[in-house]
Image (cartoon, grey):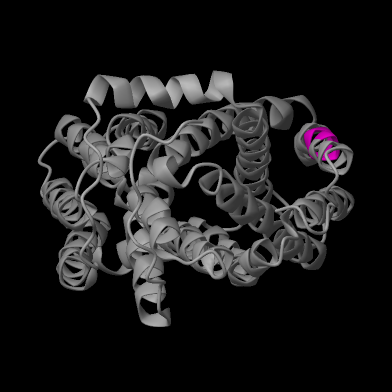
């Protein structure tokens, strides 16, 4: 891929700025998942079916996909010190509108707009890659990506609890206040960035699509990310089915709390980025995929034991989230001048993979329950494993070693 824009001078990312990026990204991504545990409550509030309420999740995700494709590539050409806080303020406005929505139709529109504007987290990740030095990039991106993962997990866990105490509208009001505070911090602490090359918007979007066709490394990285995300959503969607059915019969709040075990993966992902800095990303991705396969085996065999289920959740989180961080770090290192567009390719691919995974979860659950679902997920994980083997062998043929080729 040919670079079309300059990158800022690398002054490095200090620990405080890295943590701020992680918190801001997590807060933005969390906006996508507030509604998932609340569908039943919202359905009762508006007198609609739970199935109809499920459109809230769908439209929020569709809005997010549109925002990623049409807004995130602009990170390669616009002043992100202005755009990122502005997007966060817009998100706050639409979150507040969601809290005040008088009808379900209005809520559908406002949450779709929340999805479109909450892409600030996907602008922060490539920006962190731009600001980090070569020696710290893996560590920095690992921490920021972990913040996004934590935002996903924590939002699911606390949404139901807050709704039980204060009602579902309170969670959106609180999220609006949080986004305003984060926007103020980002406007204050984002470093001044050097001017970037002016690229026509149409050319910018075309380059997002063309880079997939031109660059085999981009394609391989995108497919690994998409298939791993597919397995991620298959597992977590199926886990909701498993825990809500006998013998567990967990409530929505209990299921949300189980997801907090995934924090183990987020914490490990903060560390795994350092492996990229040491030139160990290729072997580490292979290890992460194998760990994921092991976790699926544990969960399939221990479907009636809550202890084994919890162990499998922790192991799964470590494997999958480690791979996701390394895949994103590798993707953003392909072309320093086009990190926002490369991140768009990865995130859109992940979105497609995640949507397919959610659909497959329902199909295989109906077909054969948890055992069928985990077997299917294990088969899917063989796809990125095969691609990983190909990339590993390619590195050896080109004269590198898997341990020293990032």
Rendered residue at 73%/28% (across/down): 364
Q: Main secondary structure of the magenta part?
A: helix
Rendered residue at 35%/36% (across/down): 68
Rendered residue at 16%/66% (across/down): 187
Image check: 208 left or right of 398? left
Q: Which residues are magenta?
A: 385-390
Q: How many marks?
A: 0
Q: In the image shown, does 79 or 149 lie closer to the viewer?
A: 79
| Residue 75 on the magenta segment | no
| Residue 34 in view, yes or no | no
Q: Is residue 99 above or below residue 164?
A: above
Q: Is residue 287 above or below residue 339?
A: below
- Residue 184, image x and y in percent? 14, 69
Q: In the image shown, does 324 or 263 lie closer to the viewer?
A: 324
| Residue 136 in view, yes or no | yes
| Residue 387 on the magenta segment | yes
Image check: 158 left or right of 243? left
- Residue 165, image x and y in percent? 30, 69
Image check: 41 left or right of 214? left
- Residue 252, image x and y in percent? 50, 56
Image check: 174 left or right of 15? left
Q: In the image shown, does 271 or 401 lie closer to the viewer?
A: 401
- Residue 180, image x and y in percent? 15, 64
């Amino acid at each position: 891929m040919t670079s079309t824009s300059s990158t800022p001078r690398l002054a490095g990312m200090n620990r405080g700025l890295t943590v701020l990026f992680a918190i801001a990204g997590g807060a933005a991504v969390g906006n996508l998942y507030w509604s998932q545990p609340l569908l039943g409550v919202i359905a009762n509030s508006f007198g609609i079916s739970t199935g109809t309420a499920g459109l809230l999740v769908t439209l929020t995700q569709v809005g997010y996909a549109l925002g990623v494709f049409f807004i995130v590539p602009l990170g390669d050409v616009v002043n992100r010190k202005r755009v990122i806080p502005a997007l966060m303020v817009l998100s706050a406005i639409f979150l507040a509108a969601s809290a005040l929505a008088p009808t379900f139709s209005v809520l559908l529109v406002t949450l779709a707009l929340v999805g479109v504007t909450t892409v600030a987290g996907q602008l922060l990740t490539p920006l962190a890659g731009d600001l980090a030095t070569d020696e710290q990039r893996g560590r920095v991106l690992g921490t920021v990506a972990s913040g996004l993962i934590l935002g996903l997990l924590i939002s699911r866990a606390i949404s139901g609890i807050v709704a039980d105490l204060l009602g579902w509208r309170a969670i959106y009001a609180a999220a609006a206040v949080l986004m305003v505070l984060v926007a103020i911090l980002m406007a204050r602490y984002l470093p001044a960035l050097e001017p970037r090359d002016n690229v026509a918007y149409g050319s910018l979007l075309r380059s997002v699509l063309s880079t997939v066709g031109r660059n085999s490394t981009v394609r391989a990285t995108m497919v690994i990310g998409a298939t791993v995300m597919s397995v991620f959503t298959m597992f977590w969607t199926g886990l909701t089915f498993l825990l809500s059915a006998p013998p567990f019969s967990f409530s929505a709040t209990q299921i949300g709390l189980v997801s907090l075990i995934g924090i183990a993966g987020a914490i490990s992902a903060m560390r795994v980025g350092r492996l990229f800095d040491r030139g160990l990303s290729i072997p580490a991705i292979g290890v992460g995929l194998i760990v994921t396969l092991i976790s699926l085996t544990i969960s399939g065999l221990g479907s009636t034991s809550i202890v084994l289920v919890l162990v499998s959740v922790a192991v799964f989180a470590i494997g999958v989230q480690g791979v996701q961080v390394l895949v994103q770090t590798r993707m953003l290192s392909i072309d320093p001048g086009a990190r926002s567009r490369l991140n768009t390719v990865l995130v859109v691919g992940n979105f497609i993979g995640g949507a397919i995974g959610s659909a497959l979860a329902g199909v295989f659950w109906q077909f054969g329950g948890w055992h069928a679902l985990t077997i299917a997920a294990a088969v899917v994980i063989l796809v990125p494993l095969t691609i990983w083997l190909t990339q590993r062998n390619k590195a050896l043929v080109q004269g590198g070693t898997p341990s020293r080729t990032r």
